[in-house]
């Protein structure tokens, strides 16, 4: 029997999604140039525009359902 690794809660460093596309992975997403402002978006949800302007979103932290609650990212100093 093969050993299986559990999915890590670290983000895929290359996970991006554009406005109008479906979210590929549940987690905390931020704008390409504003990583301190995160938004929780669930898999399958349509990625939103910001102020009516299309944007590229970057996955910062995946949701970790193995723990109670979801921890937000620390604020930038």
Image (spheres, grey):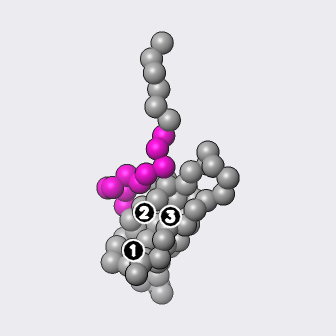
Question: Which of disc 1 and disc 3 is earlier in sequence?
Answer: 3
Q: Nearer the viewer, residue 48 or 70?
A: 70
SS assignment at label 3: strand
Residue 30, percent across and down?
Answer: 43, 71
Locate residue 33 relative to residue 62 in the image: left or right: left
Locate residue 41 relative to residue 56 in the image: left or right: right
Q: CA gap, disc 3 to disc 2?
A: 6 Å
Q: Main secondary structure of the magenta part?
A: loop
> Which residue is drawn at the image coordinates 48% and 12% (left, top)?
1
Q: Which mark is residue 16?
A: none
Q: Nearer the viewer, residue 32 or 6?
A: 6
Q: Work out which residue is located at the far bottom of the displayed protein and give it.
A: 51
Residue named by callout 1: 35
The residue stretch that appears in magenta: 7-20
> Which residue is drawn at the image coordinates 41% and 54% (left, top)?
11
Question: Which of disc 2 and disc 3 is earlier in sequence?
Answer: 3
Q: CA gap, disc 1 to disc 2?
A: 8 Å
Q: CA gap, disc 3 to disc 1?
A: 10 Å
Q: Are marks 1 and 2 in contact (CB under 8 Å)?
A: yes
Res. 21 image quadrant: bottom left
Res. 19 image quadrant: bottom left
Q: Label 2 neighbourhood size at 10 Å, few (<14), some (14-19), many (20+)?
A: many
Q: Label 1 neighbourhood size at 10 Å, few (<14), some (14-19), many (20+)?
A: some
Residue named by callout 3: 28
Q: Which mark is residue 60?
A: 2
Q: Are marks 3 and 2 in contact (CB under 8 Å)?
A: yes
């Amino acid at each position: 029997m093969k050993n299986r690794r559990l999915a890590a809660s670290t983000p895929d460093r290359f996970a991006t999604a554009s406005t109008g596309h479906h979210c590929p992975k549940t987690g905390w997403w931020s704008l390409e140039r504003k990583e301190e402002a995160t938004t929780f978006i669930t898999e399958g949800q349509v990625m939103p525009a910001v102020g009516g302007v299309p944007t590229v979103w970057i996955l910062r932290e995946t949701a970790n359902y193995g723990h109670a609650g979801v921890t937000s990212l620390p604020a930038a100093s």
